[in-house]
Image: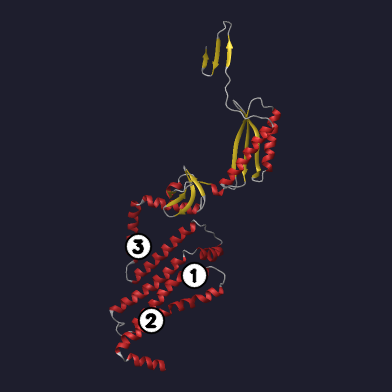
């Protein structure tokens, strides 16, 4: 009762009713907005201690809630101020502005929340038993944020007595004209959707397409950015990646090594068998070689060599480690050939010289006979 009598005495004074009391109401909520926001989120954080999503929830809605509390303080100040009559056109505009902000500010918070990987991954997707990789999540996040803001703007437009049906019809005609004028951009957009849904690669993967090879640094609506081994950045439109093969080296479980060792003619059958058996045993004893597929075989009697084919895989897919394993295998093969006294062949051609009864010589060449 004392507080009510004090308020009535102050409202009898014109300047107090028009300015002091509304200003005090606004400043009270303005300076207490941080305490109010912390009081809202503190119980949630305490009940879910050790989890990341309460922190992300507070981070997303903290600024929108602060602005919302300030707006509520301003609305309360105008509502109790006799200077703004509640039956005139000015008050109708104030009410529409306040209701519009009540729609836009939560939409702002939800749009910030859509960018939280922790909240989407730890809270929602685990319950739905669904996973989204690092490349797909930013794409879906931007789509959801765009839809949330568009929905909020449509509700605000309806609040200000705009015809939603006419607006949607206009957007349809405008979208048709835009689609005809931006075919390349739309092809890249749909190409990006195919890439995100099919997931042929992710950010950080090492890929090659045509003559371009590098590590994926970024994926967006329009293009994919690759960092080549020369440290240059190559931007490839999404539509170009959809209609051509893409090799993803990062998803190899093991890496192939295949080469042929040509031995000279004159190498005995025993030497070939011994070399093949020793090379096969060397590969099986190598801890970096996958034991599942090891092929060492006498594969061909060539024009100038007896060929041993080696076909196997390394366990590592890292390029530098792979080269190190291959180098060790080369040294081992050379050592075995040296110990077995089997020489590596080089391309040769034999020319046979014949003599007839007149004593003239004829050289039989591959392109004819010469004297």
Neighbourhood count class around disc 2 (C-alpha, 10 Å): few under 14, some 14–19, many 20 upward: some
Q: Are marks 1 and 2 in contact (CB under 8 Å)?
A: no
| Relative height, residue 231 to residue 173 (above, below) | above
Return the residue at label 2.
Answer: 27
State which quarter of the image contains the N terminus.
bottom left
Distance CA(mark 2)–CA(mark 3): 41 Å
> Could you say whether the residue bearing mark 1 is in a helix, strand or loop?
helix
- Relative side of 57 to 281, left or right: left
Distance CA(mark 3)–CA(mark 1): 33 Å
| Relative height, residue 17 to residue 209 (above, below) | below
| Relative height, residue 225 to residue 128 (above, below) | above
Return the residue at label 1.
Answer: 57
In the rendered image, residue 334, in percent from the top left (x then y), is placed at 64, 35
Q: Residue at x 51, y 66 (%)?
A: 119
Judged by depth in the image, the label closer to the viewer, 3 or 1, is: 1
In the rendered image, residue 21, in percent from the top left (x then y), is placed at 35, 86
């Amino acid at each position: 009762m004392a507080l009510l009598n004090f308020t009535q005495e102050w409202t009898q004074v014109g300047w107090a009713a028009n300015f002091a009391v509304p200003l005090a109401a606004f400043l009270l909520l303005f300076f207490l907005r941080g305490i109010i926001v912390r009081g809202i989120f503190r119980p949630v954080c305490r009940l879910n201690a050790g989890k990341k999503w309460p922190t992300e929830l507070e981070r997303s809605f903290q600024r929108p809630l602060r602005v919302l509390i300030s707006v509520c303080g301003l609305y309360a100040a105008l509502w109790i101020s006799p200077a703004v009559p509640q039956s005139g056109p000015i008050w109708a505009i104030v009410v529409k502005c306040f209701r519009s902000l009540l729609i836009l500010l939560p939409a702002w918070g939800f749009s910030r929340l859509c960018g939280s990987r922790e909240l989407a991954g730890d809270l929602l997707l685990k319950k739905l038993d669904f996973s989204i990789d690092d490349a797909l999540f930013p794409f879906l996040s931007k789509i959801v944020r765009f839809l949330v803001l568009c929905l909020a703007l449509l509700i605000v437009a309806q609040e200000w007595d705009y015809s939603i049906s006419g607006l949607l019809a206009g957007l349809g005609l405008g979208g048709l004209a835009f689609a005809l004028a931006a075919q390349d951009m739309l092809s890249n957009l749909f190409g990006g959707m195919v890439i995100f849904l099919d997931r042929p690669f992710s950010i950080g993967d090492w890929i090659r397409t045509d003559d371009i090879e590098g590590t994926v640094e970024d994926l967006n609506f329009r293009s994919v950015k690759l960092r080549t081994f020369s440290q240059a950045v190559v931007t490839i439109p999404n539509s170009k990646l959809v209609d051509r093969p893409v090799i993803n080296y990062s998803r190899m479980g093991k890496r192939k090594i295949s080469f042929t060792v040509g031995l000279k003619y004159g190498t005995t059958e025993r030497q070939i068998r011994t070399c093949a058996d020793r090379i096969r045993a060397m590969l099986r004893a190598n801890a970096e070689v996958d034991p599942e597929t090891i092929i060492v075989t006498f594969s061909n009697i060539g024009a100038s060599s007896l060929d041993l084919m080696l076909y196997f895989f390394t366990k590592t897919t890292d390029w530098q480690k792979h080269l190190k394993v291959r180098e060790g295998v080369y040294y081992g093969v050379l050592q075995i050939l040296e110990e077995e006294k089997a020489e590596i062949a080089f391309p040769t051609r034999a020319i046979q010289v014949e003599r007839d009864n007149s004593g003239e010589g004829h050289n039989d060449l591959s392109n004819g006979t010469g004297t």
